[in-house]
Image (cartoon, rainbow, N blue to C red):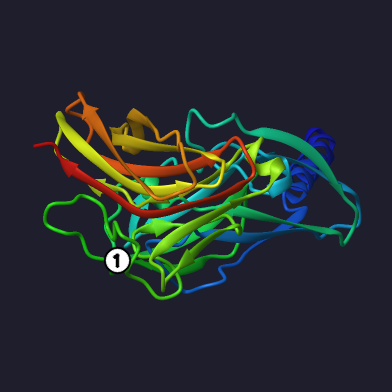
């Protein structure tokens, strides 16, 4: 009697446990990669499909990188990437870079058979990986694993002059994009024939977040003084060049110092600017340039952005 009394209870307990485990498999996560090979200058976004594969409505809290309308998933907490770089694990991968706006979150209810598409920014350069590098990536959420995607990132083919620190400082090299520079915005154009970058700002963009382009991270010796040479012109927007010093913090690359170089264009003609740049922290091992335009609608052109050790 004692054994027959407890077996149904044990069976119900196991049934409930299995049901809870089955509940965690309420969705299917499918990762994709548009390319099998990327250049160092290219931003990488991994398309994600989340599909309800049950007969009931499933609620999911989606953490996103600001702003929400860009549909970019924040990974590093509830959603995590299991990442191998050249068969070596990369621990605690996240695609949020402080002091960017903190990630937000919202709940989405998926009806049976319904799906939602999202995108995962993949900033591998936040981590000390060496290029070329082969990546293997899976997404994990509440014990649910996605399929694995694989791709390779190649080092830039651009050149660095002996006296300079940046790749392709005069925008003369490249095929479909300028070597050494990362362009994400659709209203920033590279004119290969004229060897220049063209920023086109409408009113909402100029008075909002502005437009920017990043250079690649490059090695630098600090502490030390440097000189930024800039040739640019503007029909109205303000120009700032941020010269960022980066270093390794807890296994992850972080921005440690930043120089702000305001151009203040006085005429619509080409002007040449010269700025003194200082990095005081010996922990700064890398440098990155951010070309930024904002304030008024119009056009900005860049023809030369050169960083050299100070004389």
> Can the viewer see residue 94?
no
Quadrant of image for the C terminus:
top left
Question: Residue sitting at 74 percent across and 47 percent down?
Answer: 18
> Most extreme residue toward the top, as rendered?
280
Q: Position of residue 166 (x, y in %)?
A: 26, 52
Q: Is residue 101 left or right of residue 247?
A: right
Q: Position of residue 40 (x, y in %)?
A: 37, 62
Residue that numbered label 1 is attached to: 132
Q: Quadrant of residue 280?
A: top left
Q: Quadrant of residue 108?
A: top right
Residue 197 versus residue 287 in the image, above or below: below
> Can the viewer see residue 144?
yes
Quadrant of image for the N terminus:
top right
Camera-side residue: 186 or 72?
186
Residue 192 versus residue 142 in the image, above or below: below
Camera-side residue: 104 or 295?
295
Number of other residues with Cα within 10 Å of mark 1, as a class: few under 14, some 14 to 19, many 20 or more: some
Q: Position of residue 255 (x, y in %)?
A: 36, 33
Q: Is residue 61 left or right of residue 298?
A: right
Q: Is residue 139 left or right of residue 117?
A: left
Question: Residue sitting at 21 percent across and 38 percent down?
Answer: 227
> Most extreme residue toward the left, as rendered?
311
């Amino acid at each position: 009697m004692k054994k027959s009394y407890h077996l149904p209870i044990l069976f119900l307990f196991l049934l409930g446990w299995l049901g809870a485990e089955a509940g965690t498999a309420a969705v299917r996560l499918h990762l994709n990669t548009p390319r099998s090979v990327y250049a160092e200058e290219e931003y990488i976004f991994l398309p994600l499909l989340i599909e309800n594969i049950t007969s009931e409505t499933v609620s999911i809290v989606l953490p996103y990188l600001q702003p929400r309308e860009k549909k970019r998933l924040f990974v590093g907490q509830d959603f995590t990437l299991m990442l191998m770089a050249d068969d070596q694990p990369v621990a605690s991968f996240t695609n949020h870079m402080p002091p960017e706006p903190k990630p937000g979150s919202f709940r989405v209810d998926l009806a049976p058979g319904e799906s939602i598409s999202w995108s995962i920014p993949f900033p591998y350069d936040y981590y000390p990986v060496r290029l070329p590098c082969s990546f293997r990536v899976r997404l994990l959420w509440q014990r649910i694993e996605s399929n694995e995607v694989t791709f390779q990132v190649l080092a830039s083919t651009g050149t660095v002059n002996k006296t300079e620190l940046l790749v392709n400082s005069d925008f003369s090299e490249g095929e479909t994009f300028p070597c050494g520079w990362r362009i994400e915005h659709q209203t920033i154009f590279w004119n290969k024939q004229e060897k220049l970058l063209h920023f086109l700002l409408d009113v909402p963009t100029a008075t909002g977040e502005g437009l920017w382009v990043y250079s690649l991270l490059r090695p630098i010796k600090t502490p030390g003084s440097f000189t930024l040479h800039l040739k640019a012109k503007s029909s109205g927007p303000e120009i700032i060049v941020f010269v960022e010093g980066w270093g390794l913090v807890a296994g992850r690359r972080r921005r440690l110092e930043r120089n702000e170089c305001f151009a203040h264009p006085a005429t619509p003609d080409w002007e040449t600017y010269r700025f003194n740049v200082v990095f005081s922290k010996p922990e700064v091992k890398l440098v990155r340039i951010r070309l930024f335009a904002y304030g008024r609608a119009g056009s900005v052109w860049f023809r030369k952005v050169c960083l050299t050790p100070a004389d």
